[in-house]
Image: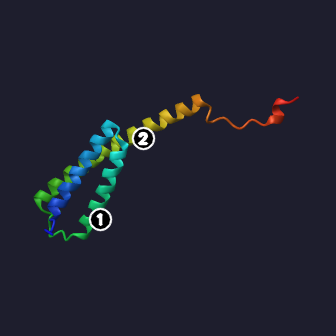
Amino acid sequence: MTERTPQFLWQDYLFLTKEMLRCLNRQDMELFHDLMNQREKMQTLIEETPDHGFRSSPQGEKLLTEIQREDQILMSHFQATHSKAKHHHQVAEAYSGGNQQPVNHRNWVR
């Protein structure tokens, strides 16, 4: 098996981050979670791979800056999507009566 360089691993990490954002925009949460798991595995692999000075190189700094920017965009979109889904759930619960307290039978009998 060919050794994967830190540059290659970080580029894959960036690719997964961008794909996660696309899935979020399409509201494909199943694929989003799958990509998130892949990205977590990629992060573990990055941590286990010797860096050989890539992070501090001009190319590495540029790539990591792009990853940080994409990650901030992703987190912003995720928070907005999560808030929207939470609001829709609360509205659905309100209309379905899901938040009502159980009625005691004795309150109805006089």
Outermost residue toward the left? 58
Q: Which quadrant is home to the C terminus? A: top right
Please report the residue visible at 57 percent of the width from the left and 34 percent of the height from the top.
93
Task: Name the kind of residue labelled 2 in the image.
Answer: His
Q: Measuring from the top left, give residue 11's x and y in whole percent.
A: 17, 55
Which element carries disc 2, helix, strand or loop?
A: helix
Q: Is residue 7 above or below residue 16?
A: below
Labels 2 and 1 touching (C-beta < 8 A): no
Check disc 1 and give the amino acid type: Thr
Q: Quadrant of residue 26?
A: top left
Residue that extends furthest to the right in the rendered view of this protein: 110
Disc 2 crowd, CA 10 A, few/some/many (<14, 14-19, 20+): few
Rendered view: 110 above or below 2 = above
> Considering only vertical position in the picture, is 69 above or below 93?
below
Which residue is drawn at the image coordinates 19% and 58% (left, top)?
Answer: 10
Q: Position of residue 68 (x, y in %)?
A: 25, 51
Give the CA separation, mark 2 to mark 1: 26 Å
Pointer 2 residue: 82
Viewed as shown, does residue 110 lie left or right of 48?
A: right
Identify the mark nearer the N-term, 2 or 1: 1
Q: Could you say which is closer to the camera, residue 36 or residue 77?
A: 36
Name the foreground residue: 10 vs 56.
Answer: 10
Label 1: state its secondary structure. Answer: helix
